[in-house]
């Protein structure tokens, strides 16, 4: 006779990785394969993207930029996993993904251009397999499984990495993606940025699961919860997940526990639903300050280097802002480009009509438009 305790829930078997304490002290018993040069590279990029984030908010408030999703407090989760990829690997972030793209070499002028409503802002570096981030929540997750499946079928040693938030982890898209990825042992990595708030929905009301990473085990997938404000733990977790994927050992779900210190976007007011004391508590786990303390303890950083880095970063950001604001206006014909493998007749006619109108205006008003870009088949 089998007895069943229907009122109990089994303990999660998901492990949690934290190597660097908020005070900047390393746990020597845990693995951490990362060089001083790599640590300094990560710190530089985190400082740069934080200063850029602050500047972008100011631009938006001045009416020089559209709605903008700040990544304050999430610099480590944004930058470090993509930095562990190769250019030929696939990366598909969420709309809060400008840090991911910056980690892969995208110039910041293009991030500004995108959030100003110009689709030339998704001009990724040559040779990168980067996809435009997904504004609809979760729709990219099955696409990433498809990218990973294609790489496996073609025998390519590529990894496909997707980002999602804690809110998206409750959507059916993730269920379908993980079912497929687990069944075919695909080289896919799903990075959950658990920043504890899906706009105004708190994590504790989002799912009854003890961790979000444990959902992976139901699909035969390895799941790990990582301190998302610990740069060393993130680097180690991402490195191991990528190595497993390349060895053909299947996908990984990484739940990165972090915190959105700012508003959801510039169109949001987090003070209406989130206690200020909560954000203050998370500031003590700030990933930028955390890594700086560690670097200082190893003699790799000091106040002089900090001042020099900030000055260099501010100068670089100013150049990017100027480049963004000096972009020539786009050619209106580009609205028809890169949408279809074979354009339908009605779009062909509409484009031809607009082309004639533009030619007439150029002749009568001596206008100069840049050449149309993109592909219109």
Image (cartoon, rainbow, N blue to C red):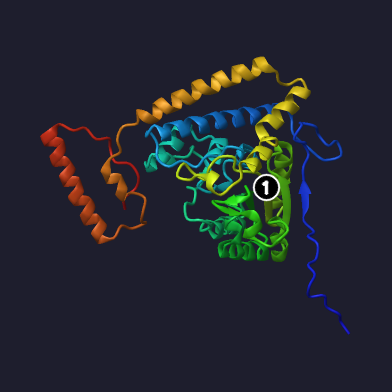
Q: Is residue 155 above or below residue 33?
A: below
Residue 226 location (% of width, % of height) = 72, 46
Residue 311 location (% of width, % of height) = 55, 18
Residue 348 location (% of width, % of height) = 24, 55
Residue 193 location (% of width, % of height) = 62, 48
The residue shown at (12%, 36%) is: 363
Q: How many marks?
A: 1
Q: In this view, does 278 lie to the left or right of 317?
A: right
Look at the image and tell me whether residue 341 can be seen: yes
Q: Is residue 353 left or right of residue 44?
A: left
- The residue pinned by badge 1 equals 256
> Which residue extends farthest top?
304
Q: What element carries label 1?
A: strand
Task: Answer with the quarter of the image where residue 321 lies.
Answer: top left
Q: In this view, does 329 lie above or below 153?
A: above
- Comparing 191 with 88, the one in front is 191
Task: Answer with the quarter of the image where residue 329 lies.
Answer: top left
Look at the image and tell me whether residue 187 can be seen: no
The residue shown at (68%, 60%) is: 185
- Comparing 357 with 150, the one in front is 357
The residue shown at (81%, 40%) is: 31
Task: Answer with the quarter of the image where residue 213 lies.
Answer: bottom right
Q: Which quadrant is the N terminus positioned in?
A: bottom right
């Amino acid at each position: 006779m089998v007895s069943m305790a229907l009122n109990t829930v089994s303990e999660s078997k998901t492990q949690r990785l934290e190597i660097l304490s908020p005070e900047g002290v390393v746990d020597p018993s845990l693995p951490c394969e990362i060089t001083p040069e790599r640590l300094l590279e990560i710190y530089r990029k985190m400082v740069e993207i934080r200063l850029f984030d602050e500047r972008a908010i100011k631009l938006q408030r001045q009416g020089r930029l559209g709605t903008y999703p700040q990544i304050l407090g999430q610099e480590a989760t944004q930058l470090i996993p993509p930095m562990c990829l190769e250019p030929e690997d696939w990366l598909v972030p969420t709309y809060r993904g400008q840090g991911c793209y910056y980690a892969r070499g995208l110039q910041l002028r293009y991030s500004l251009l995108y959030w100003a409503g110009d689709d030339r802002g998704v001009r990724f570096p040559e040779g990168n397999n980067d996809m435009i981030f997904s504004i609809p929540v979760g729709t990219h997750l099955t696409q990433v499984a498809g990218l990973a499946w294609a790489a496996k079928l073609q025998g390519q040693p590529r990894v496909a990495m997707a980002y999602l938030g804690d809110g998206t982890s409750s959507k059916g898209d993730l269920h379908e993606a993980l079912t497929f990825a687990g069944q075919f042992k695909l080289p896919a990595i799903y990075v959950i940025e658990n920043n504890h708030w899906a706009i105004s929905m708190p994590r504790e009301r989002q799912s009854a699961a003890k961790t979000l990473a444990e959902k992976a085990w139901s699909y035969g997938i390895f799941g790990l919860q990582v301190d998302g404000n610990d740069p060393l733990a993130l680097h180690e977790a991402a490195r191991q997940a990528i190595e497993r994927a390349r060895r053909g050992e299947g996908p990984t779900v990484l739940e990165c526990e972090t915190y959105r210190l700012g508003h959801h976007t510039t169109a949001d007011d987090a003070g209406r639903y989130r206690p200020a004391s909560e954000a203050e508590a998370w500031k003590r786990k700030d990933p930028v300050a955390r890594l700086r303390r560690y670097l200082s303890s190893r003699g790799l950083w000091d106040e002089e280097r900090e001042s020099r880095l900030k000055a260099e970063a501010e100068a670089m950001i100013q150049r990017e802002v100027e480049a963004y604001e000096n972009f020539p206006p786009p050619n209106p014909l580009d609205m028809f480009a890169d949408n279809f493998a074979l354009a339908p007749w009605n779009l062909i006619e509409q484009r031809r009509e607009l082309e004639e109108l533009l030619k007439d205006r150029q002749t009568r008003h001596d206008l100069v438009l840049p050449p149309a870009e993109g592909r219109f088949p």
